[in-house]
Image (cartoon, rainbow, N blue to C red):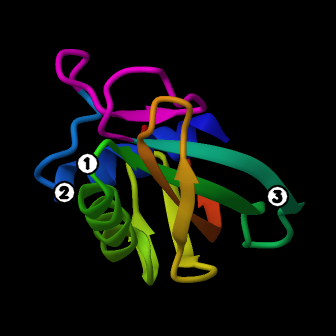
Amino acid sequence: MSSFLDEMASKMAGEVAELEFDNETGRNVFVGELPAEPDTCVAFFGLPGDQLQAGRDIPALTFPRYQIITRSADYEEAAALLTAVRTSLHGMIDYRLPSWRVMRNHAEQEGGPLGQDAQGRFEFSINFVAEFHALPPEE
């Protein structure tokens, strides 16, 4: 599941100017963790979901749910990041990532504030559900 989330995080960071995933320097998008720093960041957390086994010409499909948390010391900035995340990822249909074919990906709700963490930073959360299968290796 983390490979799928890594590729989704990379896709999103490539579309949202203030986010960086593929470069360790200045990185502010994370998968499977919400580190103490930086103050402004985005974190992906996944649940494996159900899987339908392959049959005939249909590859195995996976239906994970995942959560994204945005955080910033500024309320408006955390809210704007949530909107940017939703805009980037909601409504994906038949989209190809490097290793996955995403049949569909959508937000389960608008998302909203969680409150403040122990350092007073504002956190927002949104949940997604996806349907995808692994692409065959290129020969």
Q: Nearer the viewer, residue 128 or 133?
A: 128
- Secondary structure mainly formed by the magenta segment: loop
Kind of element beneath mark 3: strand
- Mark 3 or 2, nearer chain start: 2
Q: Which mark's residue is nearer the viewer, 3 or 2?
A: 2
Closer to viewer: mark 3 or mark 1? 1
- 105 to the left or right of 39: right
Boundaries of the magenta span = 23-41
Which residue bears the numbered disc 1? 13
Out of 78 and 55, give the one closest to the viewer: 78
Residue pictured at 65% horizontal, 56% vertical: 66
| Amino acid tagged 3 | Gly
Q: Earlier in the sequence, mark 3 or mark 1?
A: 1
The kind of residue tagged 1 is Ala
Queried whether the magenta region covers residue 25, the answer comes back as yes
Q: 135 left or right of 88?
A: right
Alpha carbon separation for disc pair 3 and 2: 27 Å
Tell me the residue that label 2 is attached to: 16
Q: Can you give x and y, in whole percent of width and height, for residue 123 in the image?
A: 48, 51
Above or below, 54 against 134 in this view is below
Q: Quadrant of the C terminus?
A: top left
